[in-house]
Image (cartoon, rainbow, N blue to C red):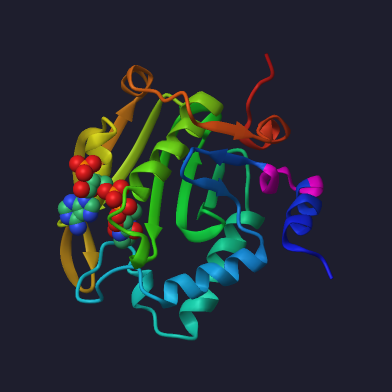
């Protein structure tokens, strides 16, 4: 029997993305192992938003069970398995006091050339509205700008998602246009927002730490200096 922390350490020997860790005084971000994915499925089952509205432009939470669990697992496994320097998604789970509370994803296409990243996130309902969303976005931005040397970070929110809009606004993102999306069969506006490196640098934090990035440099296409 392999204990959960041993599993992570043993996986990291072969796939260093499991050893990458971003920590703030409040949250920890790491790639979830399969036992962690089971915790995430349970969290999703407990609800991610009021079912009367849809905060995601891809309405994955509407999928009935048991398909939703299978789709979620397939999505996370696919992202892990199909990682390439030119197209990657780091779907980090978020821990608060050893408890899994949600997901903070960082994704990029052609990152070595463009230096642009996008983020997406969710929290279990019990953990929303307590400042965790802002903290985990702040953590992932530290990885993007400080760790990976990104130039810009994008995010998006659908019309009415005040929590997501506010997290971006507070962290210095500015509006970057809109896009019409078909959500639950109707037109929904999605707002793109962008954070420039200079804006991040002016407000960067000193209490965020990154571990295990050195071993991942090749996976992100980072050149050694
Ligand atoms: C979006 C989400 C990750 C934000 O995380 P959170 O922990 O709930 O947000 P925070 O507590 O960090 O709040 C950030 C800011 O938004 C404000 N806020 C939070 N919930 C709000 C709401 N329902 N309405 C208006 N403002 C809200 C907070 O007051 C705070 O602003 P402040 O710094 O001026 O006080 C989380 O709410 C969530 O998972 N929602 C459902 C899924 C989702 O929408 N995902 C994002 C899709 S783009």
Based on the displayed image, in which of its 4 quarters is residue 180 positioned? Answer: bottom left
Residue 88, horizontal then vertical, whole percent: 56, 45
Instruction: Answer whether residue 204 is visible to the viewer in this image.
Output: yes
Highlighted range, magenta: 13-19
Task: Say whether residue 41 is left or right of residue 203.
Answer: right
**Residue at the image point whose x is 53% and y is 51% from the top:** 92
Task: Say whether residue 14 is left or right of residue 146.
Answer: right
Task: Say whether residue 92 is left or right of residue 197.
Answer: right
Is 45 placed above or below 107 here? below
Tell which residue pokes out farthest to the right in this image.
Answer: 1
Instruction: Answer whether residue 162 is visible to the viewer in this image.
Output: no
Give the main secondary structure, helix, strand or loop, of the magenta stretch: helix
Residue 42, horizontal then vertical, whole percent: 50, 75
Quarter of the picture containing the N terminus is bottom right
Residue 173, horizontal then vertical, whole percent: 26, 33
* Circle count: 0
Decide which of 183, 155 is in the foreground and name it.
155
**Residue at the image point whose x is 73% and y is 54% from the top:** 8
Decide which of 163, 28 is in the foreground and name it.
28
Quarter of the picture containing the C terminus is top right
Question: Any magenta on residue 133?
Answer: no
Decide which of 120, 40 is in the foreground and name it.
40
**Residue at the image point whose x is 40% and y is 76% from the top:** 46
Tell which residue pokes out farthest to the top in this image.
Answer: 225
Based on the displayed image, in which of its 4 quarters is residue 7 positioned? Answer: bottom right
Residue 48, horizontal then vertical, whole percent: 35, 68
């Amino acid at each position: 029997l392999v204990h959960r922390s041993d599993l992570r350490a043993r996986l990291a020997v072969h796939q260093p993305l499991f050893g990458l860790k971003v920590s703030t005084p409040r949250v920890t971000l790491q790639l979830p192992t399969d036992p962690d994915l089971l915790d995430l499925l349970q969290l999703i089952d407990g609800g991610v938003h009021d079912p009367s509205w849809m905060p995601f432009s891809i309405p994955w939470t509407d999928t009935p069970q048991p398909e939703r669990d299978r789709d979620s697992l397939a999505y996370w496994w696919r992202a892990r398995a199909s990682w390439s320097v030119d197209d990657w998604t780091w779907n980090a789970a978020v821990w608060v006091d050893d408890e899994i509370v949600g997901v903070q994803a960082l994704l990029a296409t052609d990152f070595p050339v463009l230096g642009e990243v996008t983020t997406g996130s969710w929290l279990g309902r019990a953990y929303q509205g307590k400042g965790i969303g802002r903290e985990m976005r702040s953590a992932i931005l530290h990885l993007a700008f400080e760790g990976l040397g990104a130039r810009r970070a994008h995010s998006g929110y659908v019309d009415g998602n005040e929590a997501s809009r506010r997290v971006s606004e507070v962290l210095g993102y500015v509006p970057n246009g809109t896009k019409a999306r078909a959500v639950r069969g109707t037109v929904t506006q999605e707002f793109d927002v962008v954070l420039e490196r200079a804006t991040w640098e002016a407000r960067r934090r000193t209490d965020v730490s990154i571990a295990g990035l050195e071993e991942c440099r090749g996976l992100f296409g980072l050149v050694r200096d």
